[in-house]
Amino acid sequence: MRTPWRLAAPVLAALATAAPPASAQFQLQEVREPGQTPGWTLTPAIALASGWDSNVSMVGVDEQATTGSMGVISPSIEAEYLAKKHWFGVGYTGSFALYYQLEGLNTFDQYLRMDTRHLLSKRVTLHLHDSFAAVPTTDAIMLSDLPFVRTGSRMNDAGASLSVALDAHTKATANYGFTWVAFDERSPYAGLLRGGTAHAFGGGVQRQMGPRWSLGGSASYERSLMARLGQGVGIIQGFGTASYEATRTLSLSASFGIAHVGATSRNTARTGPAWNVSAVKRFPRATLSGAWSRSFVPAFGLGGSIQNEQIDVVLAMPVASNRLYWQAGLSWRRHDPLLAEELTRHALWLQTFVGYAVHRRVRLEAFYARSQQDSLRPGGKVHRDRVGVQVVTSRPMRIK
């Protein structure tokens, strides 16, 4: 399964290099771009934060929320190797949230990612990616159908893609993705959240039609298996695609097509329109991107499939280019279950932080994060805000 959050992968890569706030991480670290330094580079870092959480226990707005002040320690390490035809990168971040008056609710978040890129020949390039997250609440893994509750959640997202230049103007791609989602089986919510696995296969062709625009097509098949249901769900999609470089700083792309989800004991077969529209605007010291998408996706919470619509916006000001910088990300999602008895659910995630580089190795940041969900039923609203300040220190090291 590929989240539309990846529509802005180059921008998210820039955002990730800024070390997101310790207590407000995005779901998974996205695919990284290779650095510029040949050989091995190792970058250890640590962030020390103090903040406040408005809903530690993740209850609805009609219930008495547990608030708490916290201290957060986030060690991380990044390593990458760059050669003429190969690149390898790996990173780990751990986040320990220690609540001053609520010791029993202390949390430990873990994020791990790996990326490789290999130029197999002048025309063929292989990309591999894997990312893993283990977090204490469901709002942290950003899957559309999950109710926001405080339960241990784990997600792994792996993928491989092969890109082949057929000629000077035509490129073909083939890709495979694997997603695994699981929840704490000892939790009171174990009967509500299913988890499962999904395998996705796809490919496409893109041809450069002129100096600024290109056309193409793509197709994919995804097969998901929900835990404890014993049956799979198949989703087929086909798109016509177009990309246009409006200016040297503005890129536009769009995909329009049809999506079909097969029938199961939990939902009937459905066919409907699907699309994917995105734009990237580059400024001298910042990049702004936005994406809007709609399609069928697996439902790891309730089982079966849902029709998912979402909007994502990301602003990235690279720390390396700005002493005073601002990073922000917004994701809004609406999911419509294919089961009549299930309810439509809206969710929103917002993360932003402003920082100042007091030294080339030390940064001071103020952060704010919000996650909210409305299941359109009494007691179905869950809101959570986290705000604080942190000091981040890192030191890249060249390994000869």
Image: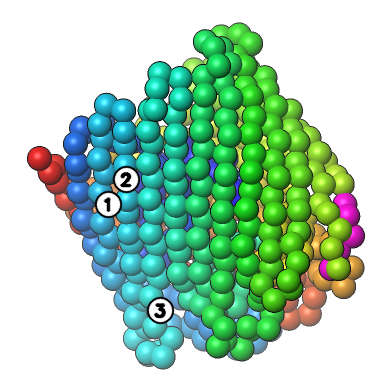
In this view, the mark in front (3 or 2) = 2
Q: Please report whichever mark, 1 or 2, sits nearer to the chain's N-terminal start.
A: 1
Describe the colour scheme in one phrase.
Answer: rainbow
Residue range (magenta)? 266-270
* Residue at x 37%, y 41% (from the top left corner): 116
Q: Which residue is mark 3?
A: 107
Label 3 crowd bin: few (<14), some (14–19), many (20+), radius 10 Å: some
Q: Nearer the viewer, residue 9 or 318?
A: 9
Mark 1 lies on a secondary structure that is: strand
Q: What's the residue at 84%, 68% (across, down)?
A: 266
Q: Which mark is residue 78?
A: 1
Amino acid type, label 3: Thr
Residue type indicated by callout 2: Gly
Q: Tell me the crowding category of disc 1: few under 14, some 14 to 19, or many 20 or more residues within 10 angstroms, Cα based.
A: some
Task: Check residue 37 for magenta coloring.
Answer: no
Give the residue at mark 2. 89
Report the number of numbered marks: 3
Depicted 107 relative to depicted 41: above or below: below
Q: Position of residue 149 (x, y in %)?
A: 60, 78
Counting from the top left corner in percent of width and height, residue 282 is at: 47, 29
